[in-house]
Image (cartoon, grey):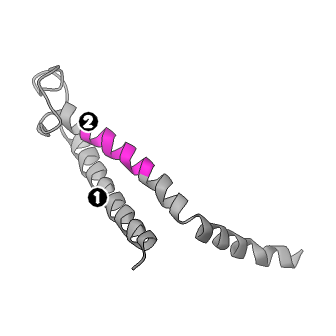
Amino acid sequence: MSIKIRLKLVVDIMLFLAGLISIVTGITLLILPSGPGTRAGLAGTSSILDITARSGLRLWHNWSSLVIIALILLHLALNWRVLLCYMKNAFRPALRKL
């Protein structure tokens, strides 16, 4: 297996895992209550490993979303030639009809 194919595989797996983290934390943030008494307003007490607090979940959610954006850009860069071929073939029948 070539290095480029391995890199594509690693990018796809990381994209899946980051998406899974973002989905789970997003749904959890949607369901969990916020406000006084829910540890939502305590500053400086949560860390990146404290996923029991909203601030820790929000941190995981935000960073995983940024990782997703970076991985999507890398995925597009790795598959740019394939995407161009898809676009050429998709619009070729429309050009023939003219």
Q: In the picture, which quadrant includes the N terminus?
A: bottom left
> Could you say where residue 89 lies in the image, as x and y percent from the top left?
70, 76
Pick whichever of labels 2 and 1 is earlier in the sequence: 1
Looking at the picture, which amino acid does disc 1 mark?
Leu
Looking at the picture, which amino acid does disc 2 mark?
Leu
Report which residue position mark 2 lands on.
Answer: 59
Left or right placement of residue 35 versus residue 88 in this view: left
Q: Residue at x 44, y 48 (%)?
A: 69
Q: Residue at x 42, y 54 (%)?
A: 71
User: Looking at the picture, does residue 74 appear above or below residue 80?
Assistant: above
Badge 2 marks a residue whose secondary structure is helix
Residue at the limit of the structure toward the front, as seen here: 3
Magenta region, main secondary structure: helix
Numbered label attached to residue 83: none
The span shown in magenta is 59-70
> Could you say where residue 94 lies in the image, as x and y percent from the top left?
80, 74
Report which residue position mark 1 lands on.
Answer: 17
> Could you say where residue 9 lies in the image, as x and y percent from the top left?
37, 69
Q: Residues within 10 Å of mark 1 (few under 14, many from 20)?
A: some
> Could you say where residue 28 lies in the image, as x and y percent from the top left?
21, 45
90 and 7: which is toward the camera:
7
Q: Residue at x 38, y 61 (%)?
A: 11
Q: CA distance from mark 2 to mark 1?
A: 16 Å
* Residue 33 shows up from this direction: no
Q: Residue at x 29, y 42 (%)?
A: 61
Q: In the picture, which quadrant includes the C terminus?
A: bottom right
